[in-house]
Amino acid sequence: MVMAFFLNFFFSGPLSIGLPVIVKDVFHGTAGSLATVEVSMGIGALIGGAILATVTLKKPGKAMIAGLIALGVFFMVAGFAGNLWHLAALVALMALVTQIVNIPLMTMLQQTTPKKMLGRMMSFLMTVSTGLVPVSYATTAFLLATGISMQTIIIISGVVVTLLAVYQLKNKRLVGFTFEGERRG
């Protein structure tokens, strides 16, 4: 839950506010340019979902952490994107790995939470996920208003997400997680 809190804070605002700002102010793009980047997000998410529907993850905990590390790296590199197509490709990759993180994470939370607490736990997760979005937006807007560039905000956020993900390598419960049907013993 703590990881979800920090990841949403450092990812949601900079991504949602950052993409339109970078497309308009850095690449001098149009609404069509922003649509290209946004469509790439949908395509990446669809590909990620299709991959998870066809591939059985042997070690979903490790896949989640690897996906988080990749997400942070792709996000950081997006701050250095040299053109619209480079940004669109990075956004597609971020959406793809987000599926590799989110789907096993939801499964893990549902499998490891006692049934009588499942509704409360999922409600709490959704509150943390959606409730923090406006705070992330406000913080990102404040940083922009102080003169910090959107690329700098995205690069720093990507570094923080990557470091948080790498830190999770110490979380033996997460690293060793397997789906219930695949447990032995």
Image (cartoon, helix red, strand yellow):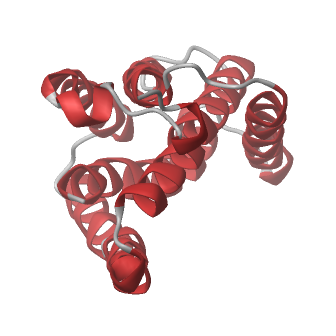
Q: Is residue 10 visible?
A: yes
- From this view, report whether residue 16 is shown above or below residue 171: below
- From this view, report whether residue 6 is shown above or below residue 178: below
Quarter the N terminus occupies: bottom left
Q: Which is nearer the eye, 164 or 159?
A: 164
**In the orientation shown, which residue stands out farthest toward the front?**
185
Q: Can residue 160 be seen in this view?
A: no
Tell me residue 15's x, y (percent).
48, 48
- From this view, report whether residue 29 is shown above or below residue 72: below
Left or right position of 96 against 149: right
Q: Which is nearer the eye, 34 or 159?
A: 159
The part of the image, by quadrant, that contains residue 72 is top left
Tell me residue 62's x, y (percent).
40, 21
Quarter the C terminus occupies: top left
The part of the image, by quadrant, that contains residue 166 is top left
- Residue depicted at 30% across the width and 64% down the height: 136
Q: Which is nearer the eye, 184 or 37?
A: 184
Tell me residue 63's x, y (percent).
48, 23
Left or right position of 155 against 6: right
Left or right position of 171 against 88: left
- From this view, report whether residue 126 is shown above or below residue 29: below
The part of the image, by quadrant, that contains residue 164 is top left
Q: Which is nearer the eye, 155 or 109?
A: 109
Total labels drawn: 0
